[in-house]
Amino acid sequence: MLAQPVPEEDRAPALNPPIIATAPDDVRDVIPLPAYRLAVRFHDGIAGIVDMSALVKSPKAGVFAALSDPLRFTEAYVQYGAVTWPGEIDLAPDAMYKAIKAHGTWVLT
C-alpha cells in the first residue's frame, strides 16, 4: 500500500501578509457616481471627482471601453491603493492624486 500524503495547512497568508496601501497618494475610498464619474478620497484626506465620461465613450478608450456599460462601471473598488475594476482595469493613483490636489477633479479624455 502506498503512503498517502498528509495535507498541510496553507500558511502562506501568515508568511506573506497582504499589501496594505497607506501612502498619502493611495486611494482610500471610491464611490461610483452617475455619468461615469467617481468620488475618491486619498489616505491624506484629499478628495475629489474623477470624470471618465469622455474616455469611456471615446474611440481611443482601449481597455476602458468595457466601462461604458454603466453596471460594469459601478463595480469600481480599491485594491493596493488604486481604483480598480474586474478584468485588471485600473487607474494610476499618482496621476489622479496630482490632478485632484491641484484642481479638485481629474478629467480623463
Image (cartoon, helix red, strand yellow):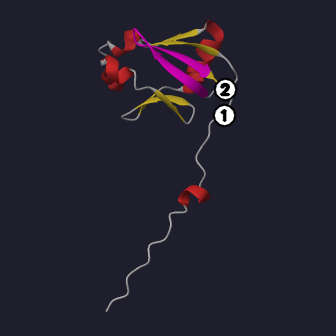
Residue 71 painted magenta = no
What residue is shown at x 38% (from left), y 14% (from top)? 55
**Real-space Cα separation, disc 2 to disc 1, in angstroms:** 6 Å
Along the line of sight, the residue nearer the viewer: 68 or 39: 39
Q: Which residue is mark 1?
A: 22
Residue 32 painted magenta = yes
Q: Which residue is mark 2?
A: 43
In the picture, which quadrant includes the N terminus? bottom left
| Quadrant in the picture for residue 42 | top right
Label tally: 2
- Check disc 2 and give the amino acid type: His
- The answer to whether residue 86 is seen in the rendering is yes
Along the line of sight, the residue nearer the viewer: 55 or 77: 77
Relative to 53, say whether 76 is above or below. Answer: below
- Check disc 1 and give the amino acid type: Thr
Task: Specify the segment rendered in magenta.
Answer: 27-41
The overriding secondary structure of the stretch rendered in magenta is strand
Relative to 71, say whether 85 is above or below. Answer: below
Name, please, the residue furthest toward the bottom: 1
Q: Is residue 87 left or right of residue 95?
A: left
What residue is shown at x 40% (from left), y 35% (from top)? 88
| Quadrant in the picture for residue 89 | top left
In the picture, which quadrant includes the C terminus? top left
Q: Position of residue 54 (x, y in %)?
A: 38, 9
- The answer to whether residue 61 is seen in the rendering is no
What residue is shown at x 61% (from left), y 51% (from top)? 17
Check whether the beta carbons of the residues at disc 2 and disc 1 lie within 8 A of each other: yes
Q: SS at mark 1?
A: loop
Characterize the local packing of mark 2: few (<14), some (14-19) or many (20 or more) Cα atoms within 10 angstroms: some
Q: Is residue 27 left or right of residue 66?
A: right
First along the sequence among labels 2 and 1: 1
What residue is shown at x 52% (from left), y 26% (from top)? 92
